[in-house]
Amino acid sequence: MRGHPRAAILGRMTAPVSVTPVLVVHGGSGRISPEHHTAAVAGTHAAAIAGQRVLLDAGRCEDAVVAAVRVLEDDPAFNAGRGACMNRDGEFEHDAAIMRSRDLRSGAVAGIRAIRDPVLVARLVMEQTRHCLLTGEGAEALARAHSVGHFGRDEVWTPKAEAAYREVLEGRGAADNRADTVGAVALDNDGHLCAAGSTGGILFKLPGRVGDTPLCGSGFYAHPVLGACCTTGVGEAILTHLLAYEALRAAAEQPGAAQQIAERLCAEISGRWSNAAVGLILVRPDGEVAIAHASEHMSWALARGATTPESGLGRR
Ligand code: ASP
């Protein structure tokens, strides 16, 4: 696609038929301590398999990304759902989002408290309301009204999150670049695209702080012409640069260069923001992918068609 991004918004809204499905997941951009490397890669690999299974059964991209993100929300190795990090007051406040290309519908929740499966509530916002983003108590009330979500501190608390919180509280560690948020993007058989993400945010954040993850265009975006993108890292750096939309728009202008463009954007934003961790995954409508990060690590996995997913912790 060339020209002003508006051309894309007004462009083709129906997808081509019979495409090789693609799913990419990430397990967060930041520094992962050596003892967690194996779990981080195993977790993203398992999530890719779950999403791939949905796509190979001719499932929709939204079902695939939700299946992948749910695996990661349940995995205590990741900062989402069970395993989420705590805010300054030792409470859990989650953000999550989903968006599909077929009609540009999106749903997100921000500051929803102590819930194991926030991506399901984001999906509820997309499918059952006329809104795009619900916060705190409103999101919790919607979830309860539809009997969606497992709520409670016991559902999300992990020794790992407690230890990380104590380290900062007691001045033994810094609340920086420690991120293991999760996300997924998918292209399904019908050529539709979807992005989803879920996070506990950043460790020791102020109560009420919201990052990029639930913000459309920053933390996620999906569009029939541009593709689907999901970001990770320090939310303040990412949302200031509208990274998800910007990466898709730039990649659309230069087919074949998505990886290079994604790496450049992550590095630029990180550099402008005191070397903040910044990462993203994206898939274009033609199946081209980018998996990029400016940080020590980002666990990821990629499933293309029926082939065994590739996974890793750094550059692909
Ligand atoms: N982007 C998330 C946030 O700032 C955190 C992360 O990706 O690790 O809330």
Image (cartoon, rainbow, N blue to C red):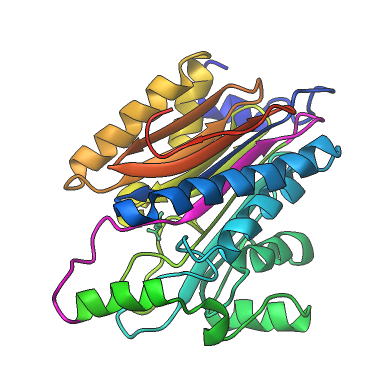
Which quadrant would the C terminus be assigned to in this image? top left
Residue lying at 20% horizontally and 44% vertically, measured from the top left: 275
Task: For ligand 1, give the image quadrant.
Answer: bottom left
Q: Is residue 182 magenta?
A: yes
- Residue 38 as seen in the image, left or right of residue 266: right
Residue lying at 68% horizontally and 54% vertically, measured from the top left: 66
- Residue 216 as seen in the image, left or right of residue 123: left
Question: Which quarter of the figure has residue 97?
Answer: bottom right
User: Residue 191: horizontal and vertical position, in percent?
Assistant: 76, 29
Seen in the picture, residue 168 relative to 179 is either above or below; the reply is below
Kindly tell me whether residue 230 is visible in this rendering. Answer: yes
User: Residue 31: horizontal and vertical position, in percent?
Assistant: 29, 51
Seen in the picture, residue 244 relative to 137 is either above or below; the reply is above
Seen in the picture, residue 158 relative to 260 is either above or below; the reply is below
- Residue 205 as seen in the image, left or right of residue 253: left
Question: Which quarter of the figure has residue 155?
Answer: bottom right
User: Residue 280: horizontal and vertical position, in percent?
Assistant: 44, 39
Q: Nearer the viewer, residue 245 or 274?
A: 274
Q: Nearer the viewer, residue 314 or 39?
A: 39
Kindly tell me whether residue 216 is visible in this rendering. Answer: no
Residue lying at 78% horizontally and 27% vertically, measured from the top left: 15
Residue lying at 34% horizontally and 43% vertically, measured from the top left: 297
Q: Which residues are magenta?
A: 170-192
